Image (spheres, helix red, strand yellow):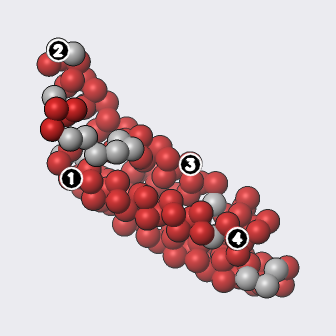
Amino acid sequence: MNMNGTADHSARKCAFLRIFSALMLLCALPMLWWCLNLINNAALDYDYAGIGCFGAALVYAFSMVTAIAGLTFAGKPHRYGWCRTLAYIQLAAGVLLIFPLRAYTILTLPPLFLLTVLYLFGVGWREMRGSEQQ
């Protein structure tokens, strides 16, 4: 691939990262409040759903950190490893919350999963080594 194609790809990834980080940051606070408001109702329905909603609120608070890291490190591919690590931690925490949330998973976690997957497209799913970067 020529130098121009690589530059276009890098600029596109940087733009994707900025857009998805901003969307994650904008969605995190309303979803955090939504999860906190669901705690009482969820606790009445299922044994651990209230705790799951609180955990979901914490994961949305963590997603703000992930989004800020994405906005800060956009355009600095050598720092994408940090962003990738934060996104994988966030994704793993969301998957672990499926079990206590049960039916409330449908109400609380889709924006988290969708935006985290799109964010990972912005930073790349895996770290590129030596010859793959060129």
Q: Nearer the viewer, residue 40 or 134?
A: 134
Q: Mark 4 or mark 1: which comes first in sequence?
A: 1
Of badges 2 and 3, nearer the viewer stands 2
| Alpha carbons under labels 2 and 3: distance apart | 33 Å
Q: Mark 1 or mark 2: which comes first in sequence?
A: 2
Question: Tag 1's secondary structure?
Answer: helix
The kind of residue tagged 3 is Leu
Mark 1, Cα crowd under 10 Å, few <14 / some 14-19 / many 20+, is some
Q: Nearer the viewer, residue 43 or 125?
A: 125
Q: Mark 3 or mark 1: which comes first in sequence?
A: 1
Of badges 4 and 1, nearer the viewer stands 4
The kind of residue tagged 2 is Asn
- The dot on residue 99 is 4
Q: Is residue 18 shown above or below 60? A: above
Q: Is residue 13 left or right of residue 115?
A: left
Question: Tag 4's secondary structure?
Answer: helix
- The dot on residue 2 is 2
The kind of residue tagged 1 is Arg
* Residue 129 position within the rendered picture, expressed as x and y whole percent measured from the top left: 20, 41
| Alpha carbons under labels 4 and 2: distance apart | 48 Å
Q: Mark 2 or mark 3: which comes first in sequence?
A: 2
The kind of residue tagged 4 is Phe
Q: Residue at x 19, y 25 (%)?
A: 7
| Alpha carbons under labels 4 and 3: distance apart | 19 Å
Mark 3, Cα crowd under 10 Å, few <14 / some 14-19 / many 20+, is few
Q: Which residue is mark 1?
A: 79
Q: Which residue is mark 3?
A: 114
- The dot on residue 16 is none
Question: Tag 3's secondary structure?
Answer: helix
In terms of image quadrants, where is residue 128? top left
